[in-house]
Amino acid sequence: MILLKIKEFRPFLTLSDRLILGPEVDGVLDPDYSIPQISYASTAPELSDDRRYDFFSRVVPPDSFQAQAMVDIILALNWTYVSTIASEGSYGEKGVEAFTQLSKEAGGICIAQSVKIPHNPKLEDYDKTIQQLLETQHSRAVIIFASEEDIRGVLNATKRANQVGHFLWIGSDSWGSKSSPINQFEDVAVGAITILPKRSSIKGFDEYFTALTLENNRRNVWFAEFWEENFNCKLLSASKKEDTSRKCTGQERIGIDSKYEQEGKVQFVIDAVYAMAHALHKMHRDLCPDHPGVCPRLEAAEGKTLLSYIRNTSFNGSAGTSVVFNKNGDAPGRYDLFQFQMTNSSTPEYKVVGQWVENLQLRLEELQWPDGEQEVPISVCSLPCKTGERKKKVKGMPCCWHCELCDGYQYQYDETSCRLCAYDMRPDSNRTSCQPIPIVKLEWHSPWAIIPVFLAMLGIIATIFVMATFIRYNDTPIVRASGRELSYVLLTGIFLCYIITFLMIAKPDVAVCAFRRIFLGLGMCISYAALLTKTNRIYRIFEQGKQTVTAPRFISPTSQIAITSSLICVQLLGVLVWFAVDPPNTIIDYDEQKTINPRLARGVLKCDITDLQIICSLGYSILLMVTCTIYAIKTRDVPEDFNEAKPIGFTMYTTCIVWLAFIPIFFGTAQSAEKLYIQTTTLTISMNLSASVALGMLYMPKVYIIIFHPEMNVQKRKRSFKAVVTAATMSSRLSQKPNERPNGEAKTELCENPAADPMSK
């Protein structure tokens, strides 16, 4: 006979467990030998707390295996944010500690709440536990290492808090597949996944235990207490059972008058006893060879010596499976996984959904969840970020994050970072990659192009008509009086001012860009060079006439063409230098229309001409225009019909107004998203208006006379230069004294001939 003192029974070692073990266990292992009666307390000195050996817990797989199985379940279900509940004591606290450590090692699992239920808890303690768990609403999964009483208390508190179906329970082997922890709280426990060490029913134990009665029990001091609990009756008046007044008859039978189910740990208790017996047998054989009973060496043996023998023991257990221990003294972890599910009959029951034998085998398709959820419920700290958002981790909580949109021209590089797209790229609609920015140019069908093109076409038609009219009536007095050579030069410049509209709208390429540089300022330069030459000639004639009757130099048509050509050559020379320094090319400008919203971003295909270069190209023409305007002002007192002086003046005043309006519009829209369209349209319309003003004021009156009043287009008597200048001077002086003339008029008949200029022939 062997007397065993089993230490540190766990909270789940219930009354029935103690009945299984009893204070004494038969130690006969083999008929060929017998081990003398040994008191464990006398053969091995008391071990310190950290060196005690719980034989039962070593045969049953330890907490670390349970915890590892739970971690694997959590990972398989993609739960990252879980809470834990532990009963105060070694079982609950060590179980949660093992789970916490293993979850950290596995990574990707965070503990939201870690709640401990005190000894002898009250209802308020359970309610407080549930309220604490609810503080982290997204943490629905709850790991529970607790006694049966605490499991019932937690489920009851959940029901009182009206949170049925909210929590997803993962129960340890203290819950297992028992009905007692969930009795009357089945609706709260639906969906719970529980763990139970793999076990087998020991048939001989059922026969032995159901045959026990108060009369034939001679071994177990807890049997009377079990009898009262099992049959809900009282044996003695001194009984501690106070919730019933019924007396036990002693005729009750286990399994007949009460429900009976073999305790799941019977196998492990028997194997624990056999492990001790095998270890003692080998220890006695090694320390006391050929010596019956306890020898002095066995008497002096320490507990750690016995522990080493136990760890080296291996044998076939009561269920036919091998009993072995690893280097830590633990039996292999073998678990069945259960889930408490609703059946077709609407009666919940436990169903085996997998197993854990060093690794997880979980049948996910067989799992059922509270409230009929079809998909695996989520238990996460933060919901997954949307496409195009990055995770900003919460310090100290790797499972928690805030989602931040990759804004602007950024795309999602990985889960935690955004990166800026390349200069010519923009993020796609999902912001997961970059795509090329669309390339645009000013299209012919755009409203920004239609208006200037329409004006240019009208201007070209009008210019061709005027030029054809002048050519047709080239020898008539009115054409000759206007200075035929400079008139044709001026018409050429006007024509080029209209033509530039088409070059500015055409699709940019090297040839188009080259022609833009040439003709951008050339048309205006030709026009205002011719007008400047005319106004300068008139100014010099009348200034010279005030001093002498001798005609000024360089007023002949040939001289006028030479002067105009010289002025035009300055513009062409500047363009040639521009070509040499910076050859024409096309570029794609991504800054011009890179809007805040990347979806609206566009790359602008344009010539490699900056705003400053445009102004510089037009600058010389503007200088000619201003100079011409100055001369027009100086010749404002010339008789009204003398050689176009007044029409030229009005033309220049109007042109200056047009270009004064152009400059603020052109530069004021430099930062606009519509810069390409506004500036191009403004520039072309300004040039069209300038050309139209010159064409309308200088040529349309003459064309009108040529076509509709040919009687006015006749030669009148010629006068000498001296007579012309004298008449003009007298007219000028008279015009300065309007109060001396009726209605302020100061005309002489010398000024009435439209062909009065002798130098225009």
Image (cartoon, rainbow, N blue to C red):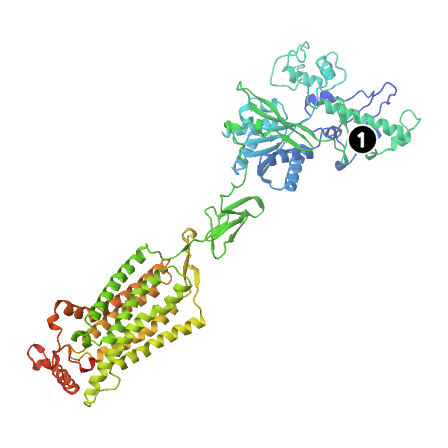
Indicate left or right for 399 with 222 as reference. Answer: left
**Is residue 117 in view from this perspective?**
no
Most foreground residue, 481 or 100: 481
**Is residue 401 in view from this perspective?**
yes
Most foreground residue, 108 or 221: 108
For the C terminus, the image quarter is bottom left
Name the secondary structure under disc 1.
helix
Q: Which residue is mark 1?
A: 310
Which percent across, then down, holds residue 401?
53, 45
- Residue ranking furthest to the left: 742
Indicate left or right for 608 with 451 as reference. Answer: right
Which percent across, then down, holds residue 226?
68, 18
| Image quadrant assignment for residue 702 | bottom left
Q: Is residue 637 above or below residue 282?
A: below
Which percent across, then down, holds residue 687?
29, 66
Dot 1, how many residues are within 10 Å of its Cα: few (below 14), some (14-19), or many (20+)? many
- Residue ranking furthest to the right: 290
The number of discs equals: 1
Q: Is residue 81 above or below residue 726?
A: above
Give the residue at x 25% y 72%: 488
